Amino acid sequence: MLRFSRSGASASREKSRLRLKFLRLRAAISTRKAAGESAAVCRRLSRMPEFLAAASILFYYPVNSELDCLPAVRTAFKLGKNVFFPRVRRGRIECVKVGSMHAVSLMKPGSFGIPRPSGRAVQPERMGLVVLPAVALDRRGARLGFGGGFYDRFLGGARAFRVGVCFQVQLCDRLPAGRHDAVMDAVASGKSFFYCSRAKVAYQARNVLKRHADS
């Protein structure tokens, strides 16, 4: 298990350094190992009570050696879930429904070369579960992304259960995190799965607020 902590360097500089380090580690994973860990993570996802209970799930399209979550997407379709993929527009993530694996395969590259769905976007509040890619994750649920803040802004308006996924080499004990960084409710890596206690309390609080708002 890798361990990092904040030193005299600023959090921003430390994040940049760790981002490069973890991206190199991810790029060095063999094709066979990546496929095996991706399959293991997808199996864990598909057995989660939160996955089984969610009517609508936001996934991501894996690019640049990211963990392949598409097997979990196939499972979601088989279970009759509403499957959504992100689309970046005007600096913000939108949720767009995709009807089948064939439709997923037809998505065209958009922002940053990531295949994007077409169609009408729905509100983030519609999502019951969000599966997020990461450059790195830690055992508190902190997530290191690419630095654009897209998911952090998106999750500020979503009450969904948040699952961060990564290869085992991308999991560490502690990452630098600020107050605006989104925290995961659970983490699934190549060899680990765990709920993040502080984050799960926050998830329950979000849903208490939702029930009060809806009543």
Image (tube, rainbow, N blue to C red):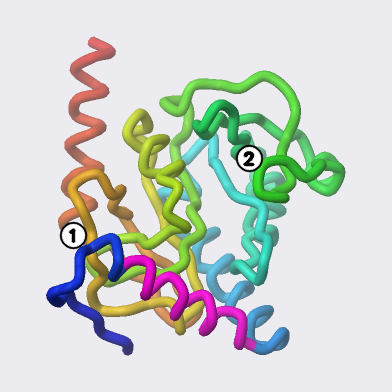
- Residue 48: percent from left, percent from top: 44, 58
**For the residue labelled by badge 1, is the local secondary structure a helix, a strand or a loop?**
helix
Choose between 143 and 146: the one closer to the eye.
Answer: 146
Going from the N terminus, do you reach mark 2 or mark 1 first? Answer: 2
Q: Is residue 96 above or below residue 20?
A: above
Instruction: Determine whether, in the image, residue 83 is placed left or right of residue 139.
Output: right
Would you call the spot at circle 2 few (<14 residues within 10 Å), some (14-19), or many (20 or more)? many
Determine the main secondary structure of the stretch shown in magenta. helix
Decide if residue 81 is in sight here.
no
**Residue in view at x 48 percent, y 53 percent:** 132
Which tag is nearer the camera, tag 2 or tag 1?
A: 2
Decide if residue 178 is in sight here.
yes
Choose between 152 and 90: the one closer to the eye.
Answer: 90
Would you call the spot at circle 1 few (<14 residues within 10 Å), some (14-19), or many (20 or more)? some
Q: Can you tell which quarter of the image residue 137 is in?
A: bottom left
- Residue 21: percent from left, percent from top: 44, 80
Residue hosting label 1:
197
Instruction: Determine whether, in the image, residue 155 is placed left or right of residue 39.
Output: left
**Residue in view at x 47 percent, y 33 percent:** 127
Examine the structure image and report whether residue 27 is included in the region drawn in magenta: yes
Name the quadrant of the N terminus: bottom left
The magenta-colored residue range is: 15-29
- Residue 46: percent from left, percent from top: 55, 59
Instruction: Determine whether, in the image, residue 183 is placed left or right of residue 101.
Output: left
Name the quadrant of the C terminus: top left
Examine the structure image and report whether residue 166 is included in the region drawn in magenta: no
**For the residue labelled by badge 2, is the local secondary structure a helix, a strand or a loop?**
strand
Outermost residue toward the left? 8
Residue hosting label 2:
85
Q: Which mark is residue 189?
A: none
**Residue in view at x 22 percent, y 52 percent:** 199
**Amino acid marked by disc 2:** Phe
